[in-house]
Image: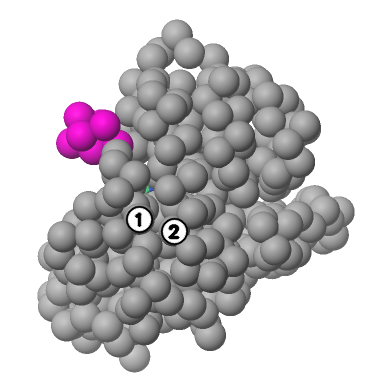
Amino acid sequence: MKSVKIGDINIENPILLAPMAGFSSLPFRIICNGMGAAYSPTELVSARSIRYNGAGNSMQYMRISPQEEGITAIQLFGSEPEDFEAAIETIMATPVLQDVSIIDINMGCPVPKVVKTGSGSALMEDPARAASIVSACRKTLERMGKKIPVTVKTRTGFNSEDEGKPDFAKALADAGCDMICVHGRTRPQMYHGESSNKAIAVMREAVRSYGIPFFANGDICDVESAKRIINETGCDGIAIGRAARGNPWIFEQVTAGLAGKELPKYPDENERKAMLIRELEGRLKYIPEEVAVREFRSAMPFYIKGIKGSAQVKVRLVSATGIDEVKEILEID
Ligand SMILES: Cc1cc2nc3c(=O)[nH]c(=O)nc-3n(C[C@H](O)[C@H](O)[C@H](O)COP(=O)(O)O)c2cc1C
């Protein structure tokens, strides 16, 4: 894939880690970027919560580290343009956050708790509001003298019969969105069934003439599926979510495969366990050990998938309380 520009930012290798709540920790994002991801947005963070409670409460989810990550992106969700304005003002006034490279807006989350507030995928049903959120973000950043691009991640529909939302994509582009990333599932599909490259292509075509980069997402799990989504959607870049859990090597695999190079050797059991510990140690830098281990319980099993005896190891890992215990379970010194 060719490099693309999001606003003024050059994206050399347009392969992203798709944001995943509970998985997109700072250490994991650093690891993925080190393996070739161009950047890795944070998980979704409530613009309203930042507005009314300040950045502190959400810091755990939106902490960035430009030195270690390179390009950084914070993903916000909400339904009121004013909440986004205030959230961005707070972010820009917060030392650890103000150097963020990109503000990404979540317009795809299918979780009822989010949808019923008019946020996430609900915005697909209200293109005017979605557009006003994009322009509010842009104006706030411009007013603050920040040349920070505003991007949107969305889906191919709100209702099961939707097969792409071309007018919605156009409304975003008209409002000045600097990049659109589309997951090829509708809201009711959540994460089930197949991701439709055909529906993504409908949205891609709708905004082709705007010249903003378009990223496709959904079910990329290897070089073949990456090639397929690129060929079938005509996208400029791709985002990989679930297949990266416990498997940051997918970024070097897909990068090499798309460049027609020989695939790097897949990590062995010890390397995978060592990576698990690296992510856990990264988490320990910011949060107490007990909390870090508890929050990492859902991600740990992905690192040992397929390893001999992994079923029993998984059972033990999900009740581990400290790093020494995790090492003991994994039989690491
Ligand atoms: C556990 C989980 C959490 C997710 N959290 C977010 C999120 O915070 N923001 C977002 O835009 N998408 C989120 N997604 C959607 C993913 O970014 C992605 O669009 C989806 O998983 C499809 O891509 P994949 O098939 O490569 O996983 C989440 C997905 C999963 C599985």
Nearer-N-terminus badge (1/2): 1
Evaluate if marks 1 and 2 touch, with contact meaning CB atoms under 8 Å apart: yes
Residue hosting label 1: 85
Q: Which amino acid does label 1 sit on?
A: Glu
Please state the total of marks drawn on the protein image.
2
Specify start and end residues of the magenta stretch as a single range.
Answer: 111-119
Query: What kind of element bears circle 2?
Result: helix
Is 109 left or right of 256, judged from the image as shown? left
- Residue under the image location 19 percent in, 57 percent down: 49
Q: Can residue 74 be seen in this view?
A: yes
- Compared with 223, 71 (above or below) is below
Q: What residue type is labelled 2?
A: Thr
Residue 118 covered by magenta stretch? yes
Q: Is residue 247 visible?
A: no
For disc 1, the neighbor class at 10 Å (few under 14, some 14 to 19, many from 20) is many
Along the line of sight, the residue nearer the viewer: 3 or 167: 167
